[in-house]
Image (cartoon, rainbow, N blue to C red):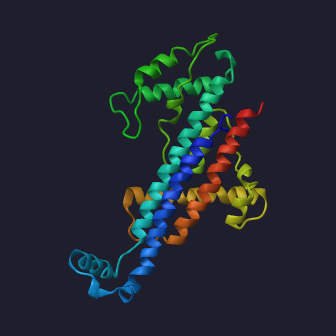
Amino acid sequence: MADSFGSAAVKEFNLGLDELEMNLGFLRTSTKLRPRLSGLLNWGAIDGDAKALVSDFLNQKSVELSPQYRGMMIVLSGAFEQLVRRLIHEAVLTINNGVSNYDQLSERIRAQNILRTGRALTTIREPPDHVVVDYHALAKQLATCVAGADSFILNADAFTLFISSVSPRHLTDLCDSIGITLNWDDFGRESGLETMLATKGVRATGKAVADYLDKFIKLRNRFSHTGTGGVIVTDSEIQNYIRFFRLFASALAQTVAAKLKAP
């Protein structure tokens, strides 16, 4: 049986969140263990490099964990960007495969394919670092997208090339580019998000979801561009962001899938 829309992308995203949680757990355990460790050791049985290593660990009395947590936010943001990239890419392929003739595509998707392919081609002199762009394939595939064509290939890569720092507004624009109207009330129907955000009702929860994502992205941007050493991020905040994105990723994939199937 074929995987449902976005299932592979969401699975990979959740595996990345698993890694973050494991690292978060290690930091949490290390922080609790260090002040207690000395009394648990048989110092007479420890010598050489092992004793020096243990001593160094015990002497780390003023380690600030917030920089570690800020780094986790950057990693989490990158994983979310990749998830969105994959979902949009898959959506374009689904749209491409859903019609038998180029003329059956909406004017919106045809125009966006030309526009975004053109933008992608302009990067040929300064290719992006985060993805590999096949410029010849982009040009060749665009040439198939002509009126009356029974065989054509939309440039899914062109729709995803410029995805970064996915704020609510950016996500809405990305969905709009493929003919999907993103309604935040759809996320307000997710009971897990309603429980987490302590809201009640579809409209209030949908707004809270957008606000939570917006807050995360704004913090991420501050950390990425300024370092912002004075901003404290805690263990519980990272745990909450991980929990939020687990719920949101699944809801986003389901929402896009449902709208792709809508007439």
Image quarter in which the N terminus is found: top right
Query: What residue is rendered at 54% in x and 59% in y?
Result: 216
Q: How many marks?
A: 0
Q: Is residue 185 above or below residue 53?
A: above
Query: What residue is rendered at 45% in x and 61% in y?
Result: 72
Q: Position of residue 168 (x, y in %)?
A: 60, 50
Quadrant for residue 110, please give it.
top right
Query: What residue is rendered at 39% in x and 67% in y?
Result: 67
Is 111 positioned to the left or the right of 54 in the image?
right
Quadrant for residue 246, please give it.
bottom right
Is 226 positioned to the left or the right of 14 in the image?
left
Quadrant for residue 7, please give it.
top right
Residue 182 in view (yes/no): no
Residue at the extreme front: 45
Residue 230 in view (yes/no): yes
Image quarter in which the C terminus is found: top right
Q: Is residue 73 above or below residue 249?
A: below
Q: Position of residue 153 (x, y in %)?
A: 56, 20
Residue at the extreme top: 148
Residue at the extreme left: 48
Q: Residue 232 or 131: which is nearer the viewer?
A: 131
Q: Residue 27 or 255: which is nearer the viewer?
A: 27
Q: Position of residue 195 (x, y in %)?
A: 72, 65
Query: What residue is rendered at 59% in x and 42% in y?
Result: 8
Q: Position of residue 138 (x, y in %)?
A: 46, 22
Is 186 positioned to the left or the right of 130 in the image?
right
